[in-house]
Image: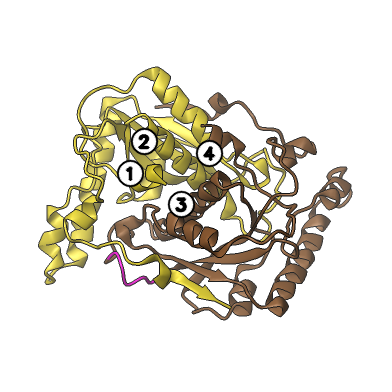
Chain colours: A yellow, B brown
């Protein structure tokens, strides 16, 4: 419960490297996630090339500027621009997570009517990684302000892999346990009971 | 790490009721999940009506029979039919999780290029609930062999809510820490390092 409460999406990283043993432990924990039919459709791509990292960061900046235009004329426009939305340049580790939409494993169990279960299995793996990171004091930031096909092209992955997440991993420079979007007045957490219904 | 390893998808439940205080704690933990823009798009529908429960179970049985036909003529056909794929009739608690695709919260942050982030946020909430349940010895089974629009209709939810999961919750009748699909030879877990790449 405390782990769930402390888990944060991190955008401010210090430059301290994450040890390779920690990275391997995080990947092993991620891979313990449940998956539909035990298909294990997650594919982790670690970004090691500085040029690719910079291309990803520049792409996210561009997408973010476009998204800001959606708020044009609203008070939220300046608010949006003031938010730090990614740590793609500073985070010591950068990793993209893809879903293999045609996995050999799992034999198609459970995906006849809900093929999206493969993608949801990848999300569960990311959450395992996130919690395992937090237990070690390592932060994770999930960047979604990117265009998935472009990221797939930049990382040169098979066409049947779809992008689930671009993750920044490293030690957080900021250890508040209140979400940054809440601290900065973007959107507070609302009572959970508002989201429960009966039938 | 042990929690992640012990977490199982449960299909065999005993009939012991889950206490209401536990259910509330699980829902509170689920609601601590990260969400894009803090949109908190999860909507939990607890199924309390026996007729609705039976309709859901009969629907899953029908979908499962159709899925079995995909394996016709293969050795996997009988194997598939021998698997228990849901506990919708026995589980003391049944809950559907929907994603509100047009949430008021979050102000659209982070979903311009990846609107599926709303659905992924709901998956994170389910994983929180799953882990919180496991800490209390409570099992969870995620049933995906259903047709989402039909379930939406059965549960009479707004058209802009999409089904993420149908969850069976209760005390497991079977406490093996090896996944059922692995024990029954459907699909083993494979080495995690096969799923890591570099660029």
Question: Which residue is painted at 48% across and 47% down in the image?
Answer: A123
* For residue B67, side relative to residue A181 (left or right): right
Question: Which residue is painted at 69% across and 42% down in the image?
Answer: A106
Q: Where residue A42 is drawn, which disc sits there?
A: 4
> How packed is label 3: few (under 14 Cα within 10 Å), some, or many (20 or more)?
many
Is residue B116 within the magenta segment? no
Marks 2 and 4: same chain? yes
For label 1, the SS is helix
Q: Which residue is mark 1?
A: A6
Q: CA–CA distance between discs 4 and 1?
A: 25 Å
**Residue contact between numbered discs 3 and 2, judged by CB atoms under 8 Å:** no
Marks 4 and 1: same chain? yes
Chain name for mark 2:
A
x and y percent of residue B48 in the render?
63, 75
Q: Which residue is mark 3?
A: B124
**Residue contact between numbered discs 1 and 3, judged by CB atoms under 8 Å:** no
Considering depth in this image, is B130 or A111 the residue closer to the camera?
B130
Q: CA–CA distance between discs 1 and 3?
A: 15 Å
Q: CA–CA distance between discs 2 and 1?
A: 8 Å
Disc number lying in front (1 or 3) = 1
Residue segment shown in magenta: B102-106
For label 4, the SS is strand
Q: CA–CA distance between discs 4 and 3?
A: 15 Å
Q: Earlier in the sequence, mark 2 or mark 1?
A: 1
Chain name for mark 1:
A
Disc number lying in front (4 or 1) = 1
From what the image shows, is residue A141 above or below residue B46? above
Q: Where residue B35 is drawn, which disc sits there?
A: none
Question: Which residue is painted at 84% across and 44% down in the image?
Answer: B76
Query: Mainly helix, strand or loop, the magenta region?
Result: loop
Q: Which residue is mark 2?
A: A134
Q: CA–CA distance between discs 2 and 4?
A: 20 Å
């Amino acid at each position: 419960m405390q782990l769930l409460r402390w888990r944060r999406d991190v955008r401010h990283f210090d430059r301290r490297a994450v040890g390779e043993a920690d990275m391997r432990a995080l990947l092993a924990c991620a891979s313990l996630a449940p998956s539909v039919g035990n298909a294990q459709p997650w594919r982790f791509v670690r970004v090691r090339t500085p040029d690719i990292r910079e291309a990803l960061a520049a792409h996210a900046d561009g997408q973010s500027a476009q998204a800001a235009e959606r708020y044009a004329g609203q008070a939220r426009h300046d608010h949006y621009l003031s938010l730090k939305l990614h740590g793609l340049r500073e985070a010591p580790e950068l990793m993209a997570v893809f879903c293999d939409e045609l996995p050999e494993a799992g034999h198609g169990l459970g995906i006849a009517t809900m093929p999206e279960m493969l993608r949801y299995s990848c999300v569960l793996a990311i959450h395992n990684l996130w919690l395992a990171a937090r237990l070690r004091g390592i932060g994770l930031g999930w960047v979604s302000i990117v265009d998935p096909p472009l990221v797939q092209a930049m990382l040169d992955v098979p066409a049947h892999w779809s992008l689930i997440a671009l993750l920044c991993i490293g030690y957080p420079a900021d250890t508040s346990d209140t979400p940054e979007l809440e601290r900065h007045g973007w959107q507070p957490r609302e009572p959970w009971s508002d989201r429960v219904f009966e039938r």
